[in-house]
C-alpha cells in the first residue's frame, strides 16, 4: 500500500516550487508586492475552498488536502497575476474556486486520486476573468529575466512535470510555439515581413525562455486535473496551446495571449471529452428500447 499517492507527491513538489518562487520574489524584489497580500490570499482561499467543498459540493468526508489545494490556487494567482490592489488577487481566487463547481464532471476520474475532472484551471480562469473585467487594474505577471532565475525555474518545473507525468504536455507547448515561431522569424529576418517589435513578441527563444512563460508552462498548463492523462493527448494539447498562443501574440501583440490560448484549448478539450463521455451513456439508455423492439 502506498503511503503517499502520485497525485499527492505532485501537489507537494508543485507547492514547494511555488513557495520558492514567492520567497525569491520578496527577497530579490522581482515582484513588487507586500508579503501580507500573499498571506491574506492564502488564508482566504484555503478557508473558502473548505466551505466550497462542504456546503456547495456536499463533501461530508473531510478531504485532508483541501488546504493544500486552496493554497496552490492562491500561489498560482499570486505568481502569474500582476495587480495594483489586493482585491484583484482575492477576486481572481474567488472566481477560480467557484468555477471548479460550475465546470466539473465526476464521470471523468483522474486515475491517481479518483477525483472528477475540471474544465478549466481555476487560477488561469480567475486570472483571465480579472484581466478582462479590469484591464487597467490587472495584467499577467512579469518577472525579471535573470539567468539564474530561469535555470531555477527550469529545474523545479521539470521536476514538477516529471512527478506529475506531464512533461510531454509542457515541452510540447514550448515545441508548438517554436514550430510556428522559427519559420516566421526566418521570413521576417530575410523577407522583411515584420518589424523588430513583431520579432521580439514572436521569436521563440526570447519568449519561451522568459521566467513568466516557464512558470506558466511547467506549473499552470501541466495541471493534472484539467489536462489529458495519456501521452498522445498531452502532446496534442501542448502543441495546440503553443500554436494558438503564437497566433494570438501575432494578432493581439500582447503577453496575455498565453492565458487566452490556454483557456481556449481547455474549452475545446472539455467539449470533446464531454461528447466522448456522453456517447456511451446515450447508447446505454437506448439499448433497452432497442432490445424490446
Image: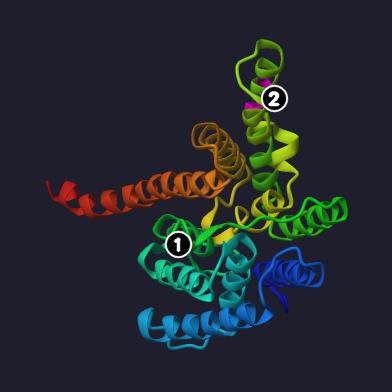
Q: Quadrant of the N terminus?
A: bottom right
Q: Residue furthest left?
A: 293
Please, what is the dominant secondary structure of the magenta stretch?
helix
Q: Is residue 180 above or below residue 275?
A: above
As rendered, which of 58 and 16 lies closer to the eye?
16
Position in image of residue 47 (x %, y %): 51, 86
As rendered, which of 228 and 213 lies closer to the eye?
213
Q: Residue at x 79, y 68 (%)?
A: 24
Q: Is residue 113 left or right of residue 54?
A: right
Q: Which residue corresponds to mark 2?
A: 182
Q: Is residue 31 above or below residue 245?
A: below
Write the start and end of the magenta stretch as one range.
179-183
Magenta residue check for 181: yes
Q: Which residue corresponds to mark 1?
A: 130
Position in image of residue 103 (x %, y %): 38, 62
Q: Residue furthest right?
A: 148
Magenta residue check for 130: no
Q: Residue at x 39, y 70 (%)?
A: 101
Q: Is residue 116 left or right of residue 176?
A: left
Amino acid at each position: 500500500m502506498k503511503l503517499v499517492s502520485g497525485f499527492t507527491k505532485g501537489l507537494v513538489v508543485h507547492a514547494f516550487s511555488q513557495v520558492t518562487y514567492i520567497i525569491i520574489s520578496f527577497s530579490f524584489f522581482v515582484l513588487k508586492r507586500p508579503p501580507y497580500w500573499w498571506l491574506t490570499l492564502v488564508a482566504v482561499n484555503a478557508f473558502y475552498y473548505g466551505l466550497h467543498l462542504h456546503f456547495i459540493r456536499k463533501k461530508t468526508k473531510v478531504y485532508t488536502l483541501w488546504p493544500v489545494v486552496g493554497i496552490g490556487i492562491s500561489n498560482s494567482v499570486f505568481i502569474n497575476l500582476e495587480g495594483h490592489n489586493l482585491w484583484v488577487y482575492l477576486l481572481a481566487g474567488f472566481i477560480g474556486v467557484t468555477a471548479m463547481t460550475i465546470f466539473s464532471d465526476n464521470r471523468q476520474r483522474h486515475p491517481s486520486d479518483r477525483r472528477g475532472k475540471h474544465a478549466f484551471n481555476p487560477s488561469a480562469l480567475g486570472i483571465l476573468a480579472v484581466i478582462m473585467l479590469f484591464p487597467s487594474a490587472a495584467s499577467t505577471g512579469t518577472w525579471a529575466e535573470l539567468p539564474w532565475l530561469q535555470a531555477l525555474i527550469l529545474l523545479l518545473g521539470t521536476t514538477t512535470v516529471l512527478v506529475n507525468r506531464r512533461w510531454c504536455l509542457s515541452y510540447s507547448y514550448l515545441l508548438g510555439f517554436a514550430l510556428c515561431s522559427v519559420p516566421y522569424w526566418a521570413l521576417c529576418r530575410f523577407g522583411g515581413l515584420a518589424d523588430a517589435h513583431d520579432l521580439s513578441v514572436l521569436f521563440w527563444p526570447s519568449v519561451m525562455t522568459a521566467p513568466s512563460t516557464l512558470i506558466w508552462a511547467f506549473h499552470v498548463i501541466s495541471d493534472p486535473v484539467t489536462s489529458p492523462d495519456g501521452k498522445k493527448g498531452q502532446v496534442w494539447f501542448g502543441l495546440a496551446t503553443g500554436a494558438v498562443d503564437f497566433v494570438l501574440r501575432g494578432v493581439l501583440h500582447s503577453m496575455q495571449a498565453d492565458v487566452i490560448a490556454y483557456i481556449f484549448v481547455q474549452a475545446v478539450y472539455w467539449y470533446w471529452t464531454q461528447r466522448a463521455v456522453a456517447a456511451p451513456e446515450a447508447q446505454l439508455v437506448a439499448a433497452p428500447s432497442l432490445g424490446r423492439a
